[in-house]
Image (cartoon, rainbow, N blue to C red):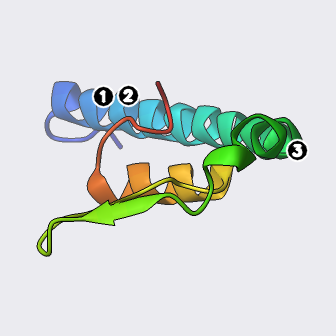
Amino acid sequence: MCPSNLQEAHDQAVKAVERQREQEQQKKRRLKAVEAEALFREQKSQFFGIAFTDGTIQVRVLESVQEYVEEGTSMHHCLFLC
């Protein structure tokens, strides 16, 4: 009935619970951000369309909250969370 290594099983269970909680928190933050989309567009729309490049690197203004979410996820950094 008991796992052969109780401490390891405990640690794995704790990590699973922590991952679940973090996913729930991220979902709440994303929902809150999506609700703020109208305010974001109102405040930032004057910058939409701005972009520049040196031929290798391209920089452009992100034009929605969803783009911030996607950028943070794809680049594995806290762009959206900060």
31 to the left or right of 18: right
Label 3 crowd bin: few (<14), some (14–19), many (20+), radius 10 Å: few
Q: Does 25 sit above or below residue 23?
A: above
- The quarter of the image holding the N terminus is top left
Q: Amino acid at mark 2?
A: Val
Which percent across, then down, holds residue 28?
Answer: 72, 36
The residue carrying mark 1 is 10
Label 1 crowd bin: few (<14), some (14–19), many (20+), radius 10 Å: few
Residue at image position (30%, 41%) is: 77
42 to the left or right of 28: right
The residue carrying mark 3 is 38
Find numbered disc 2 in the image and state the secondary structure of the residue it sits on. Answer: helix
* Residue 44: quarter of image: top right
Along the viewing direction, whichever of 44 and 21 lies nearer the viewer? 44
Cβ–Cβ under 8 Å for marks 2 and 1: yes
Give the alpha-carbon distance from disc 3 to disc 1, as whole Å: 44 Å
